[in-house]
Image (cartoon, grey):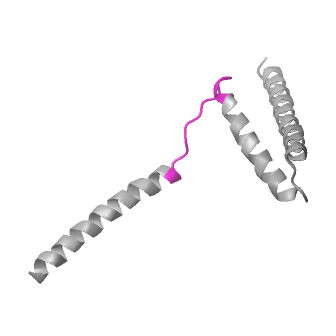
Amino acid sequence: MSIFYFLFSIYQISIVNSQLSITMATFTTPEKIGTTPASMLWLLPLAASITITYKATKLPTITARNFIKEVAMLFGSIVVFIIITALVLWALAWLITE
């Protein structure tokens, strides 16, 4: 009876290890995001989450009105900076290739 439990436990460990390997592999392979204009919209939730987290940790007192105002200002400045940087890089690439 004990050999059965031993073999069954080895089988369970191998299943857990294979499931763990698959789970770990999903976190170590990067997500494929294209460079089309539509795929660049994925930057907006990223910028929003960074902004909310940053302001939640840096504001000394958080009131709803002040927090929303500060988050909106920082979010807008991040998005504007990303757009300006993209336009500058696009123009630089156009000058180099033409």
Residue 91's spot in the image, x, y percent?
A: 83, 23
Task: State the residue at coordinates (86%, 29%).
Answer: 84
- Which SS does the magenta portion mostly show? loop
The magenta span reads 27-40
Task: State the residue at coordinates (45%, 53%).
Answer: 25
Is 87 situated above or below 68? above
Residue 95's spot in the image, x, y percent?
A: 83, 21
Residue 39 appears left or right of 7: right
Q: Quadrant of the N terminus?
A: bottom left
Is 5 situated above or below 89? below
Front in this rendered view, residue 51 or 25: 51
Residue 9 appears left or right of 76: left
Residue projecting furthest to the top: 98
- Asked where in the image residue 81 lies, by quadrant, the reply is top right
Front in this rendered view, residue 47 or 18: 47
Is 55 situated above or below 4? above
Residue projecting furthest to the bottom: 2
Residue projecting furthest to the left: 1
Front in this rendered view, residue 25 or 88: 25
Residue 29 magenta-highlighted:
yes
Is 74 situated above or below 23? above
Task: State the residue at coordinates (75%, 41%).
Answer: 48
Residue 58's spot in the image, x, y percent?
A: 87, 57
Residue 89's spot in the image, x, y percent?
A: 81, 29
Residue 42 appears left or right of 9: right
Q: Quadrant of the C terminus?
A: top right
Front in this rendered view, residue 21 or 12: 12
How many labels sit on residues? 0
- Asked where in the image residue 17 lies, by quadrant, the reply is bottom left
Task: State the residue at coordinates (18%, 78%).
Answer: 6
